[in-house]
Amino acid sequence: MRFPGHWALLAGLFGCAIPYNAEPVRHEMPLPADAFEKILPLVRLQYRRLTVVDPVEFRIQTDWVPFQRGDTPGEKRATVFRDQSGRLQVLVEVRSFSLGQDSLVVSPIYGDRRSEEELAGSIEQILTAPIRN
């Protein structure tokens, strides 16, 4: 199967086997000067451990954290990044665990639309919150 160049790049950057779409964050352009400083604590609060904090490239990536939806345990991690047009995007990757005959079976990494929408919505709220004096 052949994917457009940007999907192959995203797949390589984020370690996923199957490409998927990031969730756009709806915000005014250009971003406020303090956008990174507003978003960083929110991501840290929701995902606890950060592995990439790059204000110059505007990239925040979390470590894998425990995640369970229904009966299936797994892990998820989030990435907030600025695309080529300057708009913010959110990717939440999930991998599930199950028991095989003799070992733990880890699913391929896939995008979690619900978690992406939730994080993008929280970021939108932070970016549009009125300034308090």
Image (cartoon, rainbow, N blue to C red):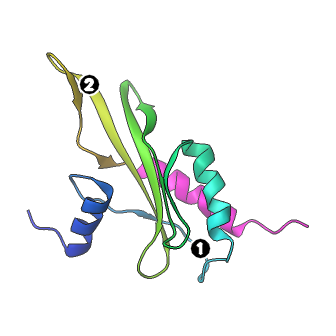
User: Which picture quadrant has residue 67?
Assistant: top left
The label shown at residue 108 is: none
Marks 2 and 1 sit apart, C-alpha to C-alpha, by: 39 Å
Q: What residue is shown with label 1? A: 27
Question: Magenta includes 114?
Answer: yes
Depth check: 23 or 38 in front? 38
Q: What residue is shown with label 2? A: 98
Question: Magenta includes 34?
Answer: no
Tell me which residue sits at (64%, 69%) in the image: 35
The local secondary structure at tag 1 comes to loop
User: Which picture quadrant has residue 70?
Assistant: top left
Do the numbered discs 2 and 1 sit on residues whose CB atoms are within 8 Å? no
Quarter of the picture containing the N terminus is bottom left
User: Which picture quadrant has residue 26?
Assistant: bottom right
Query: Against 23, is 65 above or below?
Result: above
Amino acid marked by disc 1: His
Percent of width and height locating residue 65: 46, 37
Percent of width and height locating residue 121: 58, 58
Question: Farthest residue toward the right?
Answer: 133
Is the residue marked by circle 1 packed among few (<14), some (14-19), or many (20+) residues within 10 Å? some
Q: Earlier in the sequence, mark 2 or mark 1?
A: 1
Amino acid marked by disc 2: Ser
The answer, for residue 36, to whether it is visible in the render is: yes
The magenta segment: 112-133
